Amino acid sequence: MIDRNDGRAADDLRPVTIETGYLQHAEGSALISVGATRVLCAASVENRVPRFLRNSGSGWVTAEYGMLPRSTHTRRDRGPDGRAQEIQRLIGRALRSSIDLDRLNEQTIVIDCDVIEADGGTRTASITGAWVAMAMAVEWMQRKKLLTSSPISSQLAATSVGVIEGAPLLDLNYGEDSSASVDFNVVMLGTGQFVELQATAEGDAFDRQQMNALIDLAQGGIRRLFGEQKAALAAWREGLNEPGQ
């Protein structure tokens, strides 16, 4: 048994909060905090689709990802980089797996994920928060009569797992991630199906038994994240239904 640097058990998530309606003008927005990692996710609805989808009847969901200059220990330059592009493609792929694009009626939902504070797990927090922002945007579209029913087919969330000193751990913070011998990001639907498994041996290689143990650990954490998403959306809907709203 390993002593984690923040005192958590091996199968504990960091404290998670999802604050909905964080931005006044976005069709859907959520500030997600996972420990010290904080990501602002904003959904915008556009009455257009990429050229390759024009006149197809299909909609589109895409994402952009970036880190604010002082989201890390030292200042980062603004502007796109290879890592950001890889992560935003991952976020977009993941979101599209949870929605029926044919029912979006040639409309696009763009999710902007901006990392305010980074302490490990920014891509997985972005996916989890982005799905909440997308769900809010879809409900906005229904209220505006842009959609007759919700095209969302499943919940979606993500977390990280890893191996440190031979021990499998859930939801690595930066200090843990930088010393892990295996780094593993897991993206899962509410159906229990996997969207993406990103596993890398940073030190010793891992075997199938270790991989299965890590996936089991991630599944347990993601199911808890589903609960956080549901609770955040339920509180947001309750606020919409209050008198005067």
Image (spheres, rainbow, N blue to C red):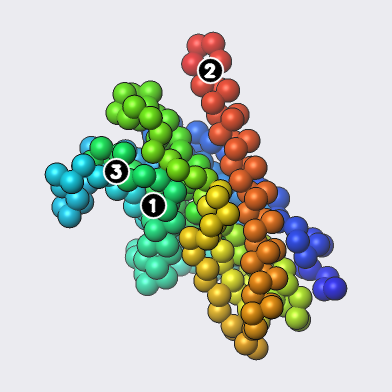
Neighbours of disc 2 within 10 Å: few (<14), some (14-19), many (20+): few
* Residue that protrudes farthest toward the bottom in the picture: 204
Say left or right for 96 vs 73: left
Q: Which residue is mark 2?
A: 241
Check the picture and name the quadrant holding the N terminus. Answer: bottom right
Residue 102, numbered label? 3
Quarter-wise, where is residue 202 in the image?
bottom right
Q: At label 1, which amino acid type do we have?
A: Arg
Q: Secondary structure at mark 3?
A: helix
Sequence order check, earlier mark of 2 and 1 = 1
Q: Residue at x 60, y 29 (%)?
A: 235
Nearer-the-camera pick, 108 or 30: 108
Say left or right for 4 vs 215: right
Residue 36, numbered label? none
Q: From the top left corner, tell me how far across and down residue 67 is, in percent.
A: 46, 60
Q: From the top left corner, tell me how far across and down residue 104 is, in percent.
A: 30, 39
Q: Judge depth for marks 2 and 1 and give the one in front.
A: 1
Q: From the top left corner, tell me how far across and down residue 50 is, in percent.
A: 20, 51
Q: Are marks 3 and 2 in contact (CB under 8 Å)?
A: no
Q: Which residue is mark 1?
A: 96
Can you say whether 235 is above or below 68 in the image?
Answer: above
The mark total stands at 3
Can you say whether 24 is above or below 1 in the image?
Answer: above
Can you say whether 24 is above or below 10 in the image?
Answer: above
Q: Secondary structure at mark 1?
A: helix
